[in-house]
Structure formats: structure tokens, C-alpha cells
Image (tube, rainbow, N blue to C red):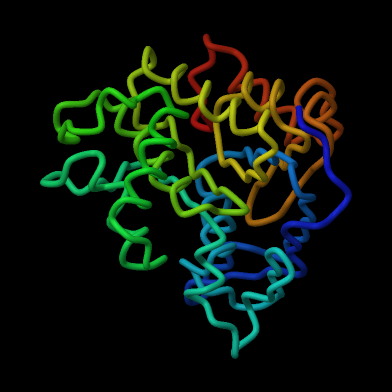
Amino acid sequence: MTGSTGSTAVEITGLKKSFGDLEVLRDIDLVVQRGEVVCIIGPSGSGKSTMLRCVNLLEEPTGGKIVVEGVELTDPDVDIDAARRRIGMVFQSFNLFSHLRVLDNLTIAQRKVLKRGKAEAEEVALRNLERVGLLDKAHALPGQLSGGQQQRVAIARALSMDPEVMLFDEPTSALDPELVGDVLAVMRQLADEGMTMLVVTHEMQFAREVADKVLFMDGGYVVEQGPAERVIGDPQHERTKTFLARVLNPNHLGTDA
């Protein structure tokens, strides 16, 4: 665990999100310090991914305020493209360009968005491929890689934009079980390097070992939040206890996992 550095990276106040009459997020408050890892857990449909997508305005909040590295993203006058450049996001699906080599997948946004030259973009890309253990795959096509390798490429691509905050939306949920470990190892490494991270995950062991803070969400609310060891190891709320009993017990066939 990295601990915080004493300055705020992300501040969410009174966040609401509705789709028509359906309230998905209800008055979410969260403060994330620079260098903190926050894991967000909860059953399907609890609002976890929607909250994460609101942080970089992939979903537009219905109400509330989001500030990332001092910039209020919910300000109507904000330069959202400039603000988003500071936020990396890794999805369940890898979203790689199948017709481009791995190296080109990592350089295209650098060149178009950050206006980096070809040589600099490739240097940054290769450095990040080395960080995720895939330097030898730079000239491969995504289809020649395993799912776990593709997800690590997606992480390297996000890192190549020099983000100050990384968002992970269930990054291992689409992977075969034997491929999950390599992706989590990369995420542990990023945490050790001091990257600010918000992670929606069902990987409870990862959350317990790596997270500085865990949020348990249900029904659009933050039911419980606090240090990982307390929320996962000694939950106070009955709903949290029920959820964790299901996901931590491999013999339970409940629907929450």
C-alpha cells in the first residue's frame, strides 16, 4: 500500500446520476489523495462503473461536483478534452485497434492528442511496454496476443498519455482465470510507483492487499468505506457482510459475484 501524499487528486461531492427515472448514483462523496489506491466493490448494478465513468465524464452527472487535480470537470466552461488527458482509463474490453501493431496502438493517441513526434511517441510506448512486461510484443498484432497480454497493452497505452489518475473498470473480468495474475501484478507495480488509482473490481485479495481505501456500493449509495482491512476484514454494515460472505465463499452460488 502506498499511503497518501497529503494532497487531493480526486474529490467527488454529492454526485448523482439518473437515466430517466432510474437513479443510478445517489449523493456519492469521495476524496482520493494523490498516490492512493481506492477499490470500489459491490454487486452488479450498484453504480460502481457509472461512478467511475462520471470521473472522466464518459457519463455526464445529473448533479454534484467532480474535481480532478484541481480542475472541476463539472464546470460547464471546463476544457473537457484537456482535463481528460490527465485521466487514464482501462475498460473490461481491451479496445485495441486490431489492424495496428501493438506499438502503433500506443503511439496513435500520443501523436494525435499530445502532438508528439514519431520518435518520442515510440520511445514512450516502448518504455511503457517494458513496464508491463511486453517489450517483445511491440511489433505483434493484438490478435496474436492472449487476453491478459492485450489488457496489459491497454494499460501501457493509457500510461503512454502520462495520466495523473488511472481508472480501472473491472480490468480482469473478461479474462480467463490463469491470465488474471499478470494484469494484477502490473496494477500492483503501478500502486507501488505511487500512481493514483480508482479500481472497480471483484478481486477481493487484490483489494485487501493493495487498496488504501475500499468503497462498498449498493443501490447507488456508498454503503461503507474505509481502510481495506476494516471494510473487507471486519465490515460494519449488514449489507457489506452479506455481499462479502458471497464473494469470499467459493461454494456460494449467489448472484452478487
Front residue (pair 33, 46): 33
Measured as percent of width and height from the top left, residue 229 is found at 81, 24
Q: Tell whether 9 sits left or right of 16.
A: right
Side of 133 where 226 appears, left or right: right
Please indicate whether residue 175 sits to the left or right of residue 82 in the image: left
| Residue lying farthest to the front in this orientation | 119
Q: Residue 72: percent from the left, percent from the top? A: 68, 76
Instruction: Work out whether residue 213 or residue 125 is closer to the camera in this orientation and state it.
Output: 125
Percent position of residue 217, x then y: 67, 46
Query: Horizontal and vertical percent for residue 108?
Result: 28, 57
Image quadrant in which the N terminus is located: top right
Left or right: where does residue 70 sit relative to residue 203? Answer: right
Residue situated in front as seen by the camera: 35 or 162: 162
Residue found at x 38% / y 45%:
157
- Tally of marks: 0
Residue 188 sits above or below residue 157 on the image = above
Residue at point 48% right, 45% down? 159
Farthest residue in the top direction?
251
Asked if 91 appears above or below 187 in the picture, the reply is below
Quarter of the rendering containing residue 29: bottom right
Q: Residue at x 83, y 42 (%)?
A: 4
Furthest residue in direction bottom, as rendered = 77
